[in-house]
Image (cartoon, rainbow, N blue to C red):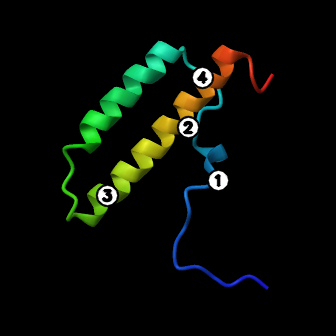
Amino acid sequence: MTEPTAYTPLSAPTSWLDPSAQPVNRALDVAREALASCGKKNIHVHSDMIAAASDLYVTLHQLVIALDAERGEGQ
């Protein structure tokens, strides 16, 4: 029996992530932009931290997809 949780994890992005791979250099540019943007958020503002976590999760996921595609993995 599983216990209910008081949160919704970011573990099922299939409905809102683009599964197609970007070129790695574009994915890196997007990752750099996300890091710069998230680095400016206020750590004491809950909504800022939720937004930063979501942005970084999506960006990292897209970067991994791009790297896997470049290496020929997942085909």
Q: Residue furthest front?
A: 71
- Given contact means CB atoms under 8 Å apart, are the residues at marks 3 and 2 in contact? no
Spatial CA span between label 4 and label 2: 10 Å
How far from the left and from the top, in percent, is residue 11? 61, 55
Tell me the quadrant of the picture where the N terminus can be found.
bottom right
How far from the left and from the top, in percent, is residue 29? 38, 20
What residue is pinned by disc 3? 49
Name which residue type carries label 1: Ala
Labels 3 and 2: the sequence-earlier one = 3
Left or right: 55, with 5 as reference point: left
How far from the left and from the top, in percent, is residue 8? 55, 67
Name which residue type carries label 2: His
Q: Is mark 1 on a helix, strand or loop?
A: loop
Q: Is mark 2 on a helix, strand or loop?
A: helix
Labels 3 and 4: the sequence-earlier one = 3
What residue is pinned by disc 1? 12
Name above or below for residue 9 compared with residue 31.
Answer: below
